[in-house]
Amino acid sequence: FGFEFTPTPPAMPAMVGRLARGMPGRIRQGISPENPGRQLDYDDMGMPASEITLAELLDQAGYHSVHIGKWHLGRTGGMAPHDQGFDESLLMHSGLYLPEDDPDVVNSKQSFDPIDQFLWRALKYAASFNGGEAFEPERYLTDYYTDQAVKVIEANKDRPFFLYLAHWAPHTPLQASREDYEALSHIESHRERVYAAMIRALDRGVGRVLGALREQGLEENTLVFFTSDNGGAHYIGIPEVNQPYRGWKISFFEGGIRVPYFLKWPAGLVGGQTFANPVHHFDIYATTAAAAGVPLPTDRALDGVDLVPHVRGERTDRPHDKLFWRSGHYRVVVADGWKLQVNDRIDGDWLFDLNTDPTE
C-alpha cells in the first residue's frame, strides 16, 4: 500500500541509517502527502484504514479477533487495531519489560549502541486496551502477554477466534526476569545470558499457549503460525546471533530476512515436514482466509497465496516464482534460487545462487 518503512519515533531513522553501515542509508519515512516538507508524527504513520486486515476479513465468518502486543501500523485516523477489526486490543503502549529499577529485572545496556541509548531514555513500562489510558502491566511483559493470551483462548473456546499475539521479546532494550536469568548461570557473558533468558521466557510462553489450546480441546483444528519479523540485530552486540547466515536486521542478507516459519494444524497438515520453497509473511493472510473459508477481497491485488495445498503436495508448483524487497534505494529479488541485491548509494551489488550458497 505504499509505506515501505517501519514507523519509528523522531530521530530514530537517522540512527538506523548510520548503523546500517551503508546498506539502507538514510531513511526518509513518514512524509506527509499534503505537506512534503513535514514528517508525520509516529502515531500518524501506518497502514491506511482502507486496507482490509485479516481481522476484518475473518469477521465475515463470525470470528472474534484479539490483538496482543506490538503494532507498528498507526494509532490515529482509524489505523489502530481496535479500529481495524480487532474486538480487543492489548497494545504495547511502550517498550520496557519491567521498570528499570524493578527488583525482579536484570538489565543489559549497550553503551556502544545509540539505538539502545535512545530506547532506554524514551521507553516506559506500559500497555493500553482498546485505545484507553496507559497502565503498568502486572508482571514481566513477555509473561504478561502470555497470561492474557491464555485467557483469550479460555474465554473464546466455544466460538471461532483469531488471536494475533505479537510478542516484543527478544527486542531491545535487553531485560530479563531475574528467575530466567538465574536459571542460565552457565552462560558467562552477561549480555548473552540476558538475551537467552528473554528467549527462555518467550519459549515458555509459546508452550503455554499451545498447552492452553490442547487443554481446551482446540489443538486439532486450530491453525497456528509461529514466525519472527526479522533476523537478529547486529547492534545487540552478539555478532554470531544469525549464524550461519550473513547479515542482520536492517539488511536484506539472509541473516536479516530468513526467519523461523512454523505452521501447526493437526487436522489439516501432517506434522514433521519441511517445505523447501521460499514463502513469505504475506502468505499468512491467504492461508488463514482459506482455512476459515473466507473469500479474499477481489477489489485489490494481493501477493500472498494459500500454502496448505503446496505443503500437502496437491500443488507442485512454487508458491512464488519471485519475491521482492525494497527499502528506498536498496532493492532485492529472489528468483529461481538466485538472489540479487542492488544498492544505488554504495559501490557494490551482490548476486548469489542460494541453491549452492545459502549463507551468501
Image (cartoon, helix red, strand yellow):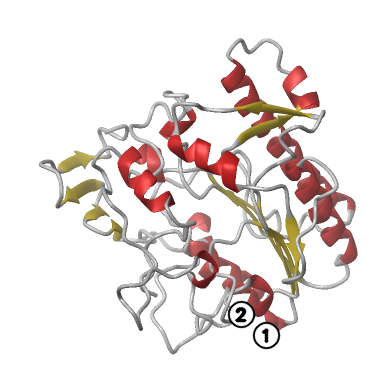
Q: Are marks 2 and 1 in contact (CB under 8 Å)?
A: yes
Q: Amino acid at mark 2?
A: Leu
x and y percent of residue 282 in the render? 47, 64
x and y percent of residue 47 in the render? 49, 73
Considering the numbered disc 2 on the image, is that residue within a helix, a strand or a loop?
helix
Considering the numbered disc 1 on the image, is that residue within a helix, a strand or a loop?
helix
Drawn side of residue 234 relative to residue 73, left or right? left
What residue is rendered at 57% in x and 21% in y? 192
For disc 1, the marked residue is 60
User: Relative to the observer, which residue lies in front, 224 or 3?
Assistant: 3
Query: Which circle marks residue 268 in the picture?
Result: none
* Quadrant containing the N terminus in the rendered view: bottom left
Q: Is residue 179 above or below residue 77?
A: above
What residue is rendered at 21% in x and 57% in y? 329
Sort mark 2 into few (<14), some (14-19) or many (20+) by Cα contacts within 10 Å: many
Drawn side of residue 297 relative to residue 225, left or right? left
Figure quadrant of residue 119:
top right
What residue is rendered at 36% in x and 71% in y? 31
Look at the image and tell me whether residue 226 can be seen: yes
Q: Amino acid at mark 1?
A: Gln
Q: Is residue 268 above or below residue 54?
A: above
